[in-house]
Image (spheres, coloured by chain):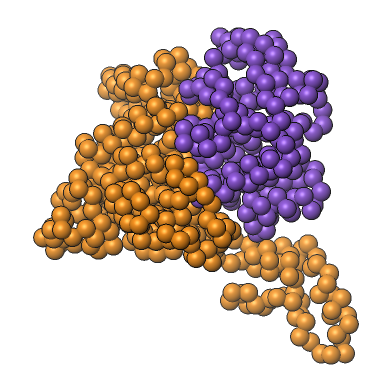
Chain colours: A orange, B purple
């Protein structure tokens, strides 16, 4: 990364795995966030092997154990064995011998976010976009296997250090409105817990309340809203509350996972304009979204995500027409927009299907 | 005809969201409900589908009030699929709630691109878009006469959105469904709506 600053970013649009927006910059000679070769897999029970019963024991390196003999025993026992194979194995056997497998959901993904930049991640639903957000925040499910390298502000990170900066230097705007605490009034949730002791604590509490009022006023939330519980909010109001939560502290990086669904156009534009203003002020934004049209208005670069990896990383300008898009899936996305053809791809591939690469004619 | 006659509603002792609001959706129509965020679009959708009872006014389906029990002829597909499925049931059980014939279920699954391996999973093991397919399949499997789509495609990518809406529109045409939908995307609404009703 030392030789990096000597590159002329104006002429070399693409270098080490990514392109640059006009406004982005490398402060202190490094990226704000770099993710390299990220792979996320889940260890889960292999239902298919269980359903197949004793016939299919050696699944993905699982050693055959236990008393159950396969179908391959002698011919004279064939009838009985066949009968046994037809029966589902008993409950305890299925429980004790349940084979497991690893399901890889994100495959060697690399991307980076610069200071002063919005990187929009668009792509198929179910392709692992939210898992990417979770990985950047160091939120891992107990059965997740996460490999790869993440740097934040020049420091190599691991799960513990990511967890330490989570909420202060990296903020999340979560996708689900269910992320709000159902038993806490939203004002308190946004303000968070004051720090310090005694007078300092009271001062911090006042500062937080002041900041919260500012944010609420900015997003057209009444003061009364602070007294409500999450179930009393409309979908759009809940989104705005989530956004306020993320902006409460002054983070360096905001990971916004679908911040706009449920907001009317006016509010959605305002929310994205705020993310833009945050980026212009020197922060970085990883904007995960389906709303391509809206994302294009604020983002510097777009990473097209499909089946767990980035298939194309390109400047926003490339989305002007299908001709400048390199990957067939990007073209499909372009054609499917209601503003353009609103057309599902002709050979409708099952979503998440690996063989769907054929693509629409561009 | 799905009719709301002079409906008034407010939560608890709070202010009224609307007073004397009326709306009619005929079979085969695709009506967009337009209003700013927080105006009560989702609440109206819930009232029309029988989840909430209005303080005043009635909801009539083909002249009769909504049935209190059994399968509702007005089905609602919500904005947050993760909140409309039982977190303790597998997706196969969620889909079976509609009580449709297995063939019909299978047909809808194929139409909406629901993969067989999702059926044994629990809701939290699926993405928002995958869950929403189940919710749409469940609503259609209940053979409704009217379908209310409350921002059904905001959590979907553009390709899936186009795919799901083409399925919804084809089904609506095939069954002569009345469709009431909410969307914040003007381009999408322009594609679908035959009529726009402002929620005043």
Q: Position of residue A310 (x, y in %)?
A: 39, 59
What residue is rendered at 61% in x and 9% in y? B19
Q: Is residue B124 above or below residue B75?
A: below
Q: Position of residue B99 (x, y in %)?
A: 80, 43
What residue is rendered at 55% in x and 58% in y? A346
B121, B159: nearer the viewer: B159
- Which of the 4 quarters of the picture holds residue A285? top left
Query: Does any portion of residue A141 appear in the rendered image?
Result: no
- Which of the 4 quarters of the picture holds residue B79? top right
Q: Is residue A39 above or below residue A284?
A: below
What residue is rendered at 64% in x and 57% in y? B115
Q: Position of residue B123 (x, y in %)?
A: 62, 46
The answer to whether A39 appears left or right of B183 in the picture is: left
Q: Is residue A224 above or below residue A168?
A: above
Q: Is residue B181 above or below residue A320?
A: above
Quarter of the picture containing the N terminus of chain B is top right
């Amino acid at each position: 990364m030392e030789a990096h600053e000597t590159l002329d970013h104006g002429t070399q649009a693409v270098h080490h795995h990514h392109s640059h927006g006009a406004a982005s910059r490398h402060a202190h000679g490094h990226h704000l966030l770099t993710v390299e070769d990220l792979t996320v897999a889940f260890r889960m029970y292999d239902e298919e092997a269980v359903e197949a019963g004793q016939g299919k024991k050696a699944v993905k390196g699982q050693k055959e154990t236990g008393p159950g003999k396969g179908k391959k025993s002698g011919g004279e026992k064939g009838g009985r064995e066949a009968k046994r194979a037809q029966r589902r194995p008993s409950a305890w056997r299925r429980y004790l011998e349940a084979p497991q497998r690893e399901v890889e959901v994100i495959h060697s993904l690399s991307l980076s976010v610069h200071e002063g930049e919005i990187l929009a991640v668009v792509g198929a639903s179910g392709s692992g976009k939210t898992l990417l957000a979770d990985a950047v925040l160091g939120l891992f499910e107990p059965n997740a296997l996460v490999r790869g390298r993440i740097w934040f502000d020049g420091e190599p990170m691991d799960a513990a250090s990511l967890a330490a900066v989570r909420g202060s230097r990296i903020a999340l705007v979560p996708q689900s409105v269910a992320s709000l605490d159902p038993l806490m009034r939203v004002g308190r949730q946004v303000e968070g817990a004051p720090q310090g002791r005694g007078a300092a604590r009271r001062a911090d509490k006042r500062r937080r309340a002041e900041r919260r009022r500012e944010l609420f006023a900015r997003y057209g939330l009444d003061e009364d809203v602070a007294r409500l519980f999450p179930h009393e909010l409309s979908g759009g109001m809940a989104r705005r509350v989530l956004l306020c939560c993320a902006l409460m502290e002054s983070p360096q990086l905001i990971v916004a996972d679908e911040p706009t669904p449920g907001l009317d156009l006016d509010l959605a534009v305002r929310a994205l304009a705020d993310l833009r203003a945050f980026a212009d002020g020197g922060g970085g934004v990883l904007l995960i979204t389906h709303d391509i049209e809206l994302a294009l208005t604020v983002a510097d670069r777009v990473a097209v995500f499909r089946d767990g990896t980035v298939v194309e990383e390109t400047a926003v300008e490339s989305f002007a027409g299908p001709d400048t898009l390199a990957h067939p899936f990007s073209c499909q996305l372009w054609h499917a927009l209601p503003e353009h053809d609103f057309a599902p791809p002709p050979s409708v591939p099952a979503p998440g299907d690996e063989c769907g690469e054929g693509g629409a004619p561009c | 005809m799905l009719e709301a006659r002079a409906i008034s509603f407010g939560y608890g002792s709070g202010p009224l969201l609307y007073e004397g609001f009326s709306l009619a959706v005929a079979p085969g129509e695709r009506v967009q409900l337009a209003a700013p965020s927080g105006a009560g679009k989702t609440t109206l959708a819930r009232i029309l589908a029988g989840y909430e009872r209005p303080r005043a006014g009635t909801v009539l389906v083909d002249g009769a009030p909504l049935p209190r029990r059994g399968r509702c002829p007005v089905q609602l597909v919500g904005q947050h699929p993760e909140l409309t499925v039982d977190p303790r049931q597998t997706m196969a059980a969620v889909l079976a709630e509609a009580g449709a014939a297995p063939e019909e279920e299978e047909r809808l699954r194929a139409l909406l691109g629901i993969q067989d391996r999702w059926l044994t999973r629990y809701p939290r093991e699926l993405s928002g878009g995958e869950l929403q397919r189940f919710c749409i399949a469940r609503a259609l499997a209940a053979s409704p006469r009217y379908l209310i789509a409350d921002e059904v495609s905001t959590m979907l990518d553009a390709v899936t959105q186009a795919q799901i809406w083409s399925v919804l529109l084809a089904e609506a045409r095939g069954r002569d469904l009345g469709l009431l939908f909410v969307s914040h995307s003007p381009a999408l609404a322009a594609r679908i709506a035959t009529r726009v009703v402002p929620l005043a």
